[in-house]
Image (spheres, rainbow, N blue to C red):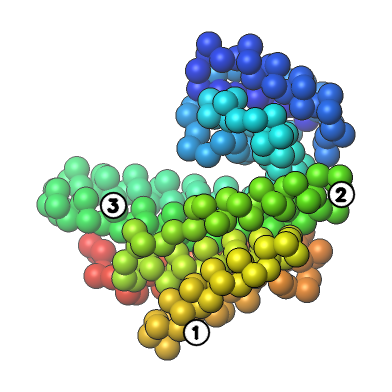
């Protein structure tokens, strides 16, 4: 495996190397690498993230914000991302293939929309409307499907690194309490944004006995939001939740059904949201 560790500010590469050195000396990595390189990369919104760049080559992107975090947060974040990397390099490679396939189709659709705009098939206002609607659909669909990766990584950490499990669970629960939000989403996106938050709360509840009271209080608020939806929308939300819930008894078999489920969640969410909006230009 070739591993690239990237940060968007070249001046911070020395700090990244030091952080990685401390991390890998403090814990048993869930994968082995044959080649390691540090380089400048594109910015990343979250603290860290991983992706496959080609067969046998992976990139771990680190945000400058992570370098400002306390050592315990850096350690837990990097361990979480390394578990993602181990999964997409191994048992969840087929699921990542599905993600790649969907991303290529999305990129082609965006390029086609831009080309049609260049050919003056619709006005600048229409283009902006279609582009924003497409972006929201895609973001929500990917957020939902990516919960499969998140559940896998959190369960793997609990199973493979029991000495870190309690601290990670407390950290994850704190993040849920601080960041849960769906107020920026309106019809028809809001129920899907609420489902995304409910899935993350359910994962926190599955990880921590300490957070049961606070978590159930938050889940009650989310349940109330879903209950107020149109019955047809509620049924769709329930179907997606059955596919994605961390309470699924067969999550240990994710490597067998993950690719098809990932693809199903993305295409189903986009289709349902598209049906709720004005038709796009034909």
Q: Is residue 3 above or below residue 225?
A: above
Report the residue at 50% width, 34% height from top.
Answer: 44
Q: Position of residue 47 (x, y in %)?
A: 56, 36
- Looking at the image, residue 180 sits to the left or right of residue 241; the answer is left
Q: Position of residue 203 (x, y in %)?
A: 66, 63
Which type of secondary structure does the marked residue at label 3 adopt?
helix
Instruction: Tell me the quarter of the image containing the N terminus.
Output: top right
Sequence-first disc among 3 and 1: 3
Q: Position of residue 260 (x, y in %)?
A: 65, 65
Which type of secondary structure does the marked residue at label 2 adopt?
helix
Name the residue carrying label 1.
Answer: 235
Viewer-nearest of discs 3 and 1? 1
Q: Position of residue 183 (x, y in %)?
A: 36, 62
Q: Residues within 10 Å of mark 3 (few under 14, many from 20)?
A: some
Sequence-first disc among 2 and 3: 3
Residue lying furthest bottom: 231
Name the residue carrying label 3.
Answer: 131
Name the residue carrying label 2.
Answer: 162
């Amino acid at each position: 495996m070739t591993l690239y560790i990237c940060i968007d500010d070249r001046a911070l590469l020395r700090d990244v190397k030091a952080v990685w050195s401390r991390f890998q000396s403090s814990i048993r990595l869930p994968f082995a690498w044959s080649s390691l390189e540090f380089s400048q990369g594109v910015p990343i919104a979250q603290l860290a993230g991983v992706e496959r760049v080609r067969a046998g080559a992976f990139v771990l992107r680190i945000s400058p914000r992570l370098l400002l975090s306390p050592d315990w947060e850096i350690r837990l974040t990097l361990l979480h991302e390394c578990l993602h990397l181990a999964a997409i390099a191994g048992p969840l490679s087929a699921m990542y293939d599905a993600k790649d396939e969907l991303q290529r189709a999305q990129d082609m659709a965006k390029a086609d929309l831009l080309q049609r705009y260049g050919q003056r098939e619709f006005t600048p206002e229409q283009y902006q409307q279609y582009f924003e609607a497409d972006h929201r659909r895609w973001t929500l669909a990917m957020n939902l499907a990516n919960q499969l990766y998140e559940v896998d990584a959190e369960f793997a950490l609990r199973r493979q690194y029991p000495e870190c499990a309690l601290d990670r669970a407390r950290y994850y629960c704190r993040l849920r309490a601080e960041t849960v939000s769906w107020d920026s989403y309106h019809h028809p996106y809001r129920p899907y944004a609420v489902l995304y938050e409910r899935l993350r709360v359910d994962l926190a509840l599955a990880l921590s006995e300490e957070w049961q009271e606070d978590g159930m209080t938050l889940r009650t608020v989310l349940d109330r939001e879903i209950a107020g939806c149109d019955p047809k929308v509620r049924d769709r939300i329930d179907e997606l939740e059955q596919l994605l819930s961390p309470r699924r008894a067969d999550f240990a078999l994710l490597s067998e059904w993950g690719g098809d489920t990932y693809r199903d969640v993305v295409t189903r969410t986009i289709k349902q949201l598209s049906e709720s909006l004005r038709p796009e230009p034909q």
